[in-house]
Amino acid sequence: MNSKLALPALLAMCLCNPATIGRACDLCAIYTATEAHGGNHTGFMFGAAEQFTHFGTLQFDGIEEPDPIGQELNSSITQALVGYDFDRISLQINIPYIHRSYRRAEGFAVEEGTESGFGDLSLVARYLAWHHESDQVTGLWHVLAGIKLPTGSSDRLQEELDEVEIEGAPESGIHGHDLALGSGSFDGVVGTSLYLRSGRAFVTGSAQYSIRSEGDYGYRYANDFMWETGPGVYLVLNDNTSIALQLLASGEKKGKDTFRGESAEDTGITDVFLGPHLSATFGPGLSGEIGLDIPVRIDNTALQSVPDYRIRAGMTWRY
């Protein structure tokens, strides 16, 4: 499923606009904190993002299944982020490194192993389409477009050629398309994000649609729609530091992959996560975030290993 592949981490942390230095410290703090969501100025950006997901539940068509051998997949995706802001336009390169450990059924045996290496590199351009700033209200609206390059190894997709079900043996919920580091395809992505603040309260929302093409071994991951939204409040807000707590709902809707023109039945999914996220800014250029996502709804097709929880964290430095 797509959530087991490396996804672009669209982080953008911004400096306090020099034009605001002469204003009240609390207002400058608001500027510093809110511009962590992407303001309109120039400068370099460097960052790192981590997403760890534990898949430890078997589901068949959305219903939990017995798992006598304890199948599981632990997926860690670490991304290095490098970018530059040209006033309203931002360019960013995401370089993912993926490590996965797994335990799955292989006939009547149990197979344990790891898969690690660099994933598919992404190039993303983002445009600040609307920006409003006042003492009490801030609004930011971005649109983005990007391309994913086939830089990660797709060797695990070869397993799709050799999969054979053995009568009476446990069925595996973890397959080659779950373990592959790359797809072997050039894929596109379009999206949008919105940030609104009133006083110390704020809300964010974003949506992203991935457009897949056929990759190696005749395998094509399905197009994928992801979204995220939730309210938040600034717990600490001064001229040097801001700390914000947010309740985020996020989700994904993905159809079935295709393999050599045939539908891959065990790849479709619709899910919804909910959890707390904490973000902070330190001084004019350093920002970070960490969050926990718990699934509240997962509808999948056929038998799949589905996530029990997800942890996300990131840190960005801009100058």
Image (cartoon, grey):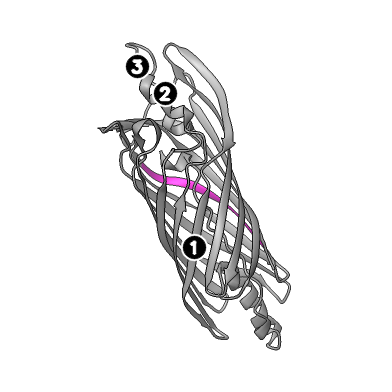
Check disc 2 and give the amino acid type: Glu
Q: Residues within 10 Å of mark 2 (few under 14, many from 20)?
A: some
Tell me the quarter of the image containing the N terminus: top left
Q: Secondary structure at mark 2?
A: helix
Vertical relation: 294 (above or below) 146: above
Q: Which residues are magenta?
A: 287-298
Q: Camera-side residue: 95 or 23?
A: 95
Q: Residues within 10 Å of mark 1 (few under 14, many from 20)?
A: some
For residue 96, say whether it is visible.
Answer: yes
Q: Camera-side residue: 12 or 133?
A: 12
Asked if disc 2 and disc 3 are in contact, CB closer than 8 Å, the reply is no
Q: Which labelled disc corresponds to residue 164?
A: 3
Q: CA distance from mark 2 to mark 3?
A: 10 Å
Say whether residue 27 is left or right of residue 230.
right
Residue found 34% across the figure and 42% down from its top: 222
Check disc 3 and give the amino acid type: Val
For residue 99, say whether it is visible.
Answer: no
User: Which circle, 1 or 3, is nearer the viewer?
Assistant: 1
Q: Secondary structure at mark 1?
A: strand
Q: How many marks?
A: 3
Report the residue marked by disc 2: 159
Report the residue marked by disc 1: 125
State which quadrant residue 268 falls in: top left
